[in-house]
């Protein structure tokens, strides 16, 4: 007797035979049922003889339900089972916050918080008994109020840029659809904030929107790429002269996939992508893991100096997800030796994720934002350079608290990518890499992106920015501050274990200006500083050698 798991398949075969007999002997009306049952029978036979899926060989026909339920599992979970705090990478509460602010809907919530305020990872900002804002007092204008803007540009910058305290993080045309890029940039124009191009360079859709651009230059040098894939100074100079380009950002790494290059297959290189990136059609487009234009920290600083000169003094900086600490310290040592200092540094947390990446890269590579941001800030302070370099932060920053925490930990401004994607209508289907984005945001399918109405979404992008910055200002005023720029480590509180509650000023280490230059023994910093050399990204000493040297100095 055949196993019970074959019952449905056997029944299907029997009904197919019966339908065939009835069709031939009784009436042609049984033809359609016969064809349907015959089709199922063919599928069942195929399931039995195929060798790819063991489930289908053991469970012909009914085994397909497993794949069907697996396919709709994310949607079932999102719409029917997840709570307001369960969704990942962004909880439903966070997504709803963006949707409401983008639609100008009041974001007040009744009946108290749903967070477990005693959880180990809970953080908060304390309020003041002498708040600055409140009903009846004038509201800050997000478009022009200097309390909500940051001037970026060091001593060698000839064209400093007044940036909003909250901007659009890097997302490339090619990853995003044409309509998405146009809506983002149009919204940035209306809201007077900046739009980072991503490493895909400046496209016609960025230019059409007219908003301020941060031109990101990755290892593929798109927009300034020579025929051999290297950097072309003449092309860069021409692109940088565009008045819409306000800053230039060299991408060293990103939180979604630090240390990982990429290949855009020839089949995906459309005419518009080729135009924006300055690459030929019909050929694979390679972005190497490392920059060909420099191989040492000193060469990186020289490269930044060249970009500043070629751009006629526009702010030039770099973005990184913090990796080996001695490598960043080597860059800082190169700043000291060459006297070439970037105008800004953007710290991308490992929790960043608009770029699709291998699972191990997404989950287990790179430093999270809180730790990376504090380290970068402290290193610049310890080297006496912090006053000359502005710091941006990116990595799951959506709410006023998210931005406030980043400012407390050393940032001067914040960027958001997925927050603005939600403002465009993203529903977190996590199908960005499939070219089948259901809302037309992350796709190059012409039909799918038509669903994204540019005027409506541009308004929502501007609304989200305005309402978030307004909430940030109110949050700062409730903390007794005149501006969010006055947030300091002592304002944000972190729970350390089950009992200790400490402000970030006590929970984390904070250096004083010039500390690293004194030779003092500073736990968490001095060892890596001794390992760093401006002429190499590789450590010049092992951890043990650096520790021995440090203790020897301390002993004398």
Image: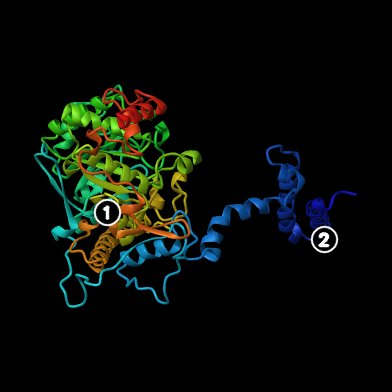
Residue 399 sits above or below residue 276 on the image: below
**Disc 1 element:** helix
Viewer-nearest residue: 536 or 176: 536
> Residue 102: x and y, percent?
31, 64
Q: Please tell me whether mark 2 or mark 1 is closer to you in this view.
A: 1
- Residue 345: in sight, yes or no? yes
Contact, mark 2 vs mark 1 (Cβ under 8 Å): no
- Whether 551 is drawn above or below 524: the answer is above
Q: Residue furthest left?
A: 158
- How many callouts does the rendering have? 2
Q: Residue at x 35, y 56 (%)?
A: 419
Query: Measuring 47% from the left and 51% from the top, which residue is drawn there?
Result: 430
Looking at the rendering, which quadrant does residue 164 occupy? bottom left
Mark with earlier residue (2, 1): 2
Distance from the alpha carbon under mark 2 to that under mark 1: 80 Å
Dot 1 crowding, Cα within 10 Å, few <14, some 14–19, many 20+: many
Q: Nearer the viewer, residue 445 or 473?
A: 473
- Where residue 441 appears, as percent x and y from the top left, is 38, 52
Determine whether, in the image, residue 237 is placed left or right of residue 353.
Answer: left
Q: Can residue 289 be seen in this view?
A: no
Q: Residue 276 carries which label?
A: none
Q: Residue under circle 2? A: 26
Per the image, the residue denoted by label 1 is: 407
């Amino acid at each position: 007797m055949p196993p019970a798991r074959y019952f449905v398949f056997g029944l299907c075969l029997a009904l197919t035979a019966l339908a065939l007999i009835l069709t031939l002997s009784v009436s042609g009306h049984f033809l359609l049922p016969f064809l349907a049952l015959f089709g199922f029978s063919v599928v069942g036979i195929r399931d039995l003889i195929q060798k790819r899926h063991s489930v289908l060989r053991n469970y012909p026909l009914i085994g397909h339900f497993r794949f069907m339920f697996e396919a709709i599992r994310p949607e079932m979970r999102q719409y029917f089972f997840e709570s307001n705090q369960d969704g990942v990478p962004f909880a439903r509460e966070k997504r709803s916050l963006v949707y409401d602010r983008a639609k100008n809907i009041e974001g007040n919530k009744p009946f108290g918080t749903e967070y477990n305020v005693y959880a180990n990872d809970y953080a908060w900002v304390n309020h003041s008994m002498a708040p600055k804002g409140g009903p009846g007092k004038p509201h800050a204008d997000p478009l022009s109020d200097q309390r909500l803007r940051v001037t970026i540009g060091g001593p060698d910058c000839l064209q400093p840029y007044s940036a909003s305290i909250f901007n659009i993080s890097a997302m490339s045309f090619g990853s995003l659809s044409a309509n998405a890029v146009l809506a983002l940039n149009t919204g940035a124009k209306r809201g007077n904030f900046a739009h980072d191009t991503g490493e895909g360079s400046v496209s016609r859709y960025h230019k059409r929107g007219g908003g301020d651009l941060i031109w990101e230059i990755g290892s593929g040098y798109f927009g300034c790429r020579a025929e051999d894939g290297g950097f072309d100074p003449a092309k860069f100079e021409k692109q940088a002269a565009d008045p819409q380009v306000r800053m230039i950002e060299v991408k060293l790494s990103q939180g979604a996939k630090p240390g990982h290059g990429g290949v855009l297959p020839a089949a995906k290189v459309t005419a518009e992508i080729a135009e924006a990136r300055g690459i030929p059609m019909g050929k694979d487009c390679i972005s190497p893991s490392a920059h060909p234009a420099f191989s040492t920290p000193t060469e990186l600083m020289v490269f930044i100096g060249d970009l500043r000169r070629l751009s006629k003094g526009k702010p030039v900086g770099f973005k990184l997800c913090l990796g080996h600490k001695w490598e960043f310290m080597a860059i800082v040592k190169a700043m000291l030796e060459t006297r070439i200092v970037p105008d800004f540094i953007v710290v991308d947390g490992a929790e960043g994720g608009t770029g699709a990446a291998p699972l191990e890269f997404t989950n287990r590579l790179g430093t999270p934002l809180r730790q990376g941001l504090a380290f970068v800030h402290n290193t610049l302070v310890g080297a006496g350079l912090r006053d000359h370099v502005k710091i941006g932060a990116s990595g799951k920053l959506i709410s006023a608290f998210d931005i406030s925490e980043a400012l407390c930990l050393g940032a001067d401004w914040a960027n958001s990518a997925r927050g603005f994607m939600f403002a465009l209508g993203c529903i977190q289907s996590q199908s960005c890499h499939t070219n089948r984005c259901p809302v037309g945001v992350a796709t190059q399918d012409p039909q799918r992106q038509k669903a994204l109405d540019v005027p409506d979404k541009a308004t929502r992008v501007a609304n989200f920015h305005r309402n978030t910055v307004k909430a940030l200002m109110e949050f700062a005023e409730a903390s007794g501050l005149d501006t969010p720029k006055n947030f300091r480590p002592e304002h944000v509180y972190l729970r350390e274990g089950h009992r200790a509650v400490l402000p970030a000023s006590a929970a984390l280490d904070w250096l004083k200006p010039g500390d690293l230059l004194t030779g003092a023994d500073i736990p968490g910093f001095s060892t890596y500083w001794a390992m760093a050399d401006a002429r190499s990204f590789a450590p010049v000493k092992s951890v043990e050698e650096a520790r021995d040297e440090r203790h020897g100095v301390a002993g004398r």
